[in-house]
Image: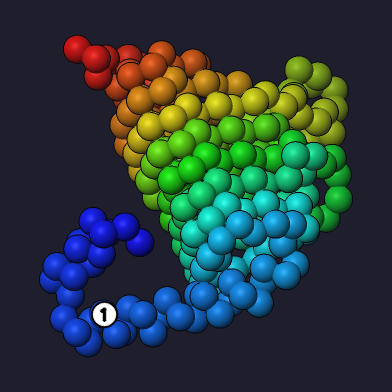
């Protein structure tokens, strides 16, 4: 931790609160020690919560000081694997799923930059490639989809027509607020804010504030 983080930790914490926190985190650390031998690569500390599922762990590549919280599911079966930068956190019960574990096409995967987080109950459907930059915040229950089902032919089922993959890019320093949905083929420009409950179905210019279903431009953060 940096000195500023240590100072923040001390404020409002009693001695017993700090002891309890260290005790709780120690179990995350021990789970991380056990799991790291099965993971493709780990650069530094790895903290893992209870009931975390990491499938095809050899295709997971982890930076320093990574946290994967309770109940998260990470399926790493992807062409490019799952790549996490330094100080990335995966929130409780988040799902990262590039491929179906019961068979079918192998997805493209996910790349996350440094100091970014996947929020609690997020769903990251990275069958098409998803790239998330540095310092990106995904609030709870955000969903990102990098594919669309094909449905043009009415003579056969939609399920049998397959999908079209389209890359999703979220550039550095974006905030995606709670319950937002990011659809396939979208690029969200650097420094943008997506308001809670929005559905983003087209590219977003850098430093934009967007809101609504579908999301519309509200203002620029640049003034």
Q: Residue furthest front?
A: 3
Depicted 184 relative to depicted 73: above or below? above
The residue shown at (46%, 36%) is: 134
Q: Left or right: where does residue 189 sit relative to residue 160?
A: left
Q: Position of residue 131 (x, y in %)?
A: 58, 33
Residue 87 visible, this orientation: yes
User: Few, some or many C-alpha atoms within 10 Å of disc 1 (few <14, some 14-19, many ≥20)?
Assistant: some
Task: Kindly state the secondary structure of the residue where label 1 is placed.
Answer: helix
In the rendered image, which quarter contains the C terminus?
Answer: top left
In the rendered image, which quarter contains the N terminus?
Answer: bottom left
Residue 197 visible, this orientation: no
Q: Quadrant of residue 191?
A: top left
Q: Nearer the viewer, residue 193 or 11?
A: 11
Q: Position of residue 95 (x, y in %)?
A: 58, 53
Depicted 104 relative to depicted 31: above or below? above
Q: Left or right: where does residue 107 sit relative to residue 147?
A: right
The residue shown at (81%, 19%) is: 153
The residue shown at (17%, 75%) is: 13
Depicted 137 relative to depicted 42: above or below? above
Q: Left or right: where does residue 28 sit relative to residue 205?
A: right
Q: Nearer the viewer, residue 112 or 139?
A: 112
Q: Quadrant of residue 72?
A: bottom right
**Residue denoted by label 1:** 18
Q: Position of residue 81 (x, y in %)?
A: 73, 45
Q: Quadrant of residue 125?
A: top right
The residue shown at (36%, 80%) is: 22
Q: Nearer the viewer, residue 181 or 51?
A: 51
Q: Nearer the viewer, residue 94 or 172?
A: 172
């Amino acid at each position: 931790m940096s000195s500023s983080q240590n100072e923040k930790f001390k404020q409002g914490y009693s001695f017993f609160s700090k002891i309890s926190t260290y005790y709780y985190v120690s179990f995350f650390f021990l789970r991380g020690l056990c799991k790291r031998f099965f993971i493709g690569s780990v650069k530094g500390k790895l903290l893992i919560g209870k009931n975390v599922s990491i499938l095809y762990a050899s295709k997971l590549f982890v930076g320093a000081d990574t946290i994967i919280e309770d109940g998260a599911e990470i399926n790493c079966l992807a062409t490019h694997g799952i790549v996490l930068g330094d100080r990335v956190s995966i929130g409780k019960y988040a799902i990262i799923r590039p491929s179906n574990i019961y068979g079918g096409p192998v997805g493209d995967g996910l790349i996350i930059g440094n100091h970014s987080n996947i929020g609690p109950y997020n769903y990251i459907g990275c069958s098409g490639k998803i790239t998330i930059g540095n310092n990106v915040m995904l609030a709870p229950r955000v969903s990102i989809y990098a594919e669309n089902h094909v449905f043009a032919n009415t003579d056969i089922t939609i399920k049998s027509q397959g999908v079209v993959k389209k890359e999703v890019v979220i550039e550095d320093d974006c905030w995606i607020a709670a319950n937002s949905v990011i659809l396939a083929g979208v690029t969200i420009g650097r420094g943008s804010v997506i308001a809670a409950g929005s559905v983003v179905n087209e590219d977003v210019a850098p430093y934009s504030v967007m809101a609504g279903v579908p999301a519309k431009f509200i203002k620029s953060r640049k003034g």
